[in-house]
Amino acid sequence: MRTDRLYYGAREPAPRETGGRLPTALVVPMERPVALSTLGWQAVYRLLADDPGMAPERCFTLGRDGEPVTLESGSPLSGFPVLALSVNFEEDLLHLLRALKAAGVAPRREQRPDFPLVLVGGPLAFMNPAPLAPMADCFFVGEAEAGMADVFAKFREVWLAGGTKDAMLDAVAGMSGIYAPGRSKTPVRRVVASGPSLADPAYSCFTGSDAVFRDTLLLEANRGCPYACRFCAAGFIYRPPRQATLAELQDIVEQTDPPKVGLVGTALTDLPDLLPFLTWLRSRGTKFALSSIRADGVTEELLSFLRQCGIRTITLALEGPSRRLRQSASKKLDEADFLNAVVLCARHGVNHLKSYCILGWPGETDEDYEELGDFLGQIARTRDENIKRKKEFMRFTLGTSSLVPKPNTPFQWAPMATEEALENRQKMLRDIVKPLKGFRVESDKPFQARLQGLLARGDESLFDFVELAAENGGWKKALRLWDGDMSDWLDRERSFDDPLPWDVIDIGVTKAHLWEEWQRSKRFVASPGCPDHGCDGCRRCGMDEFLS
């Protein structure tokens, strides 16, 4: 594994000579401190930077005035033959469009007969590329290590031969993982770096004191999720679920030697070697941080170790307000496991317990939230009964978010709760929590959630709306000027036969399986997750045939 392209602190890579190489601007629609604490684009940078035929440069489009230029050479985006856009969130569309306009690059592909070629990658490229399709010349659909290097090699070959942008697109339109609107045969199959384990975990190329996660090497511990919660895109668009091996994780840490490691993953406590890896980090003097963990993964041994390492905040996932809604979401959570985790946290002196809950489920009722109120009361009593020292106290923060039914999940056919309904649920929850000592609620903004839902589920016509937002000061003004109606996209249940804008992508999970899971959700019946033995012989969701 090469390490000569890993940089920490203030050190930055110098501009690479471009003779015989393909200059590429990797455009990240974030401010630098946030981008430095975001993993996906860094994995792509590492892949390109390790190729001697490539000359990648970075451009963070937020937090800087004037024309966006690259960090390495200060070059304008309009001077690159290829712009690789990293798109993680629906709201990124607005930032990317503004960046292109500020750079003098036409936002629509039909307005760009010549270079630069705009390639879009990231989760939105294979969840639903439609709203971005009028802007993108092509999309990379899937996992970067599963073929992106081959695509860029073809770009380079055509470009060095003096080929046009059309020639570059024609050369890659039929390649695995490429969706070139109007050129590629659809549905385009997502490319997957398959195998029994996560053979090439993503990790940071850059970090520093100004990063949100300061001086922290982000390290991918697992990809996908075996629990298959019906609302969670990661559990479907990243199948099959895979875990990194202890040896691979240790090798990355040894070669990068960071002051701190931030483990990234959806089910960290499922990692068989989690505690041995954390113990090894501690033995070499490397600090670490974990994202949220499953309640059933909180053991006496793990929590005792975490407290010895000075960790005083634990985050547990609750997800649904009631058992009935968790069944509908196929969230595998035993309330007894959650309360046991509270017991352990209280006894070991954790001073801040966080959890998060999703509001706005299809078919929810006031009774579901009354049940949540009762359960929060149980949590408060359990905490108070198990705190050993009088001077200690454990705060409880419940973060709430609004359910956004995402493409390529069983909830893709579901209606979304209205803004008024979401606001009412938030108020109801604040009233429930008010009498509980040390409890507080943090909530998202329902308008932003509805906007995310619109952009997540829209078709190519939504690009007109994004243009209005870019030209008229933001989303709310654009909604007043737009001739569409958000409710047309969000407020009705779709049928199986309704065409979906994201049908141009085949993620590997069959539409029939997603539909069956949607029907089971309406009956509030959970389903088993992915089997431990992998996809071979499973024959439930279609991934076994997709990977064969």
Image (spheres, helix red, strand yellow):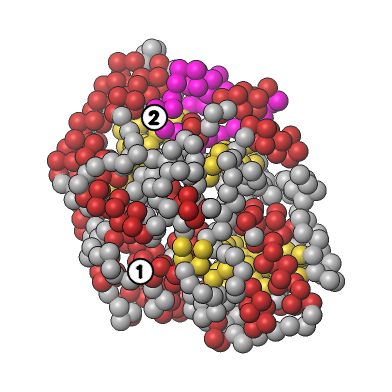
Mark 2 secondary-structure assignment: helix
Residue 395 belongs to magenta span: no
Q: Nearer the viewer, residue 425 or 84?
A: 84
In this rendering, position of residue 364 left or right of residue 6 = left
Is there any visible trace of residue 65 in the rendered image?
A: no
**Residue 289's spot in the image, x, y percent?**
56, 34
Evaluate if marks 1 and 2 touch, with contact meaning CB atoms under 8 Å apart: no
| Local secondary structure at mark 1 | loop
Q: Amino acid at mark 2?
A: Ala
Bin the neighbour count of mark 1 within 10 Å (Cα to Cα): few under 14, some 14-19, many 20 and up.
some
Res 500 label = 1
Please state the horizontal and vertical placement of residue 361, each as a whole percent of the image.
Answer: 25, 50
Q: Picture coordinates of residue 186 (x, y %)?
A: 48, 72
- The label nearer to you, 1 versus 2, is 1
Mark carried by residue 300: none
Up the image or down, 294 lies above or below 210; here it is above
Looking at the picture, does residue 285 appear above or below residue 231?
above
Q: Is residue 241 left or right of residue 460?
A: right
Residue 178's quadrant in the figure? bottom right
Magenta residues span: 284-312
Per the model, the C-alpha gap separating discs 1 and 2 is 36 Å
437 sits to left or right of 535:
left
Residue 482 place in picture, x, y as percent: 33, 79
Q: Name which residue type carries label 1.
A: Leu
| Residue found at x 80% / y 69% | 21
Looking at the image, which residue is at 78% across and 47% down? Answer: 2
In this rendered view, identify the residue nearer to me: 533 or 290. Answer: 533
Q: Which residue is mark 2?
A: 295
- Residue at point 79% right, 80% down? 161
Q: Residue at x 38, y 12 (%)?
A: 388
> From the image, which quarter does the N terminus lie in?
top right
Decide whether residue 290 is among the magenta residues: yes
